[in-house]
Image (spheres, grey):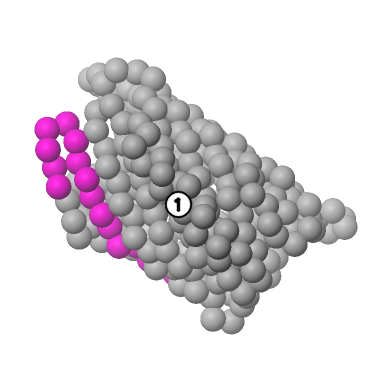
Amino acid sequence: MKNNFLIGVLLLASGLFVSAQGPPITADKPIMLGGKSFTTKTLTEIRKTRRGTFTYVPLMLHYLPTSNSLVAVHLPYIGFNFENGESGGDLADIKLLGKYQFFRKDATGKTFRVVAKTVQTLPTGRDLDLIDLSTGNYAGYYGIVAGYETLKYGISNEIGYNWMPNGTLDELRYKLGFGLPLLKPQYPNKQLNLYFEYTNSWVVERDWYQLLYAQGIQYAGKNITFDFAIQLPLVNDVAQGRRLNYSLFLGTRYTF
């Protein structure tokens, strides 16, 4: 699986010169707004797998103490409907997020930025063994997010490791996001963007590998955005009963 992950990273990195636009939907971005600003957001995921269907609904509260730092808390609910008939809903794993921008280079109409990122996952959810949703185990994620954005396109990259000391879901992850604006820049701000996003995931201890592709669209107006994306597996080399069929994402965010 290690070779598959490295090949996947190289294939994704080869697309770095394709036009794109942020902010991404299933990936992350290094671009931050001004300090002392708040964002409330949600990104509901409906995940269909061979085991069943799972609906993940997080309430995310983001705060920027300064223009180069961010702290956040994600309070999630998860509904589950297993193929064996078990169903219900409960609190999923709460997440604490921190980002710090340590590199920034601006030019006319474009910017390149790099941030360090950590996500601390608290074991508040049931042990549903759902990667990144509800595992009932503590995990610490540590990564780097880099992005280049212009008035015409933007690219986001993220690489990191999710460490789960008391579980078997340690994960090496690489994400690459592209977007394409459909409207010309205008004021007041109004955007309609297409997104092309890839997730390259190697679950180390279980020797599972997935390469996922998400096609999304976003409408942004002033300080509110609406997101929709569908994610499909391109490579699904995991246990037969655990394979992803697809995920649907529905989201909105409001900044004040």
How would you classify the magenta stretch by its main secondary structure? strand
- Circle count: 1
* Viewer can see residue 11: yes
In the image: residue 37, left or right of residue 90: left
Name the element at disc 1. Answer: helix
In the image: residue 86, left or right of residue 132: right
Closest to the observer, 183 or 80: 183
**Quadrant position of the C terminus in the picture:** top left
Stretch in magenta: 105-120
- Indicate the amino acid at tag 1: Leu
Closest to the observer, 120 or 27: 27
* Viewer can see residue 69: no
Residue 147 position, x and y percent, is 30, 46
Whether 52 is among the magenta residues is no
Residue 185 position, x and y percent, is 26, 21
Residue underneath mark 1: 10
The residue positioned farthest toward the bottom in the image shown: 166
Whether 107 is among the magenta residues is yes
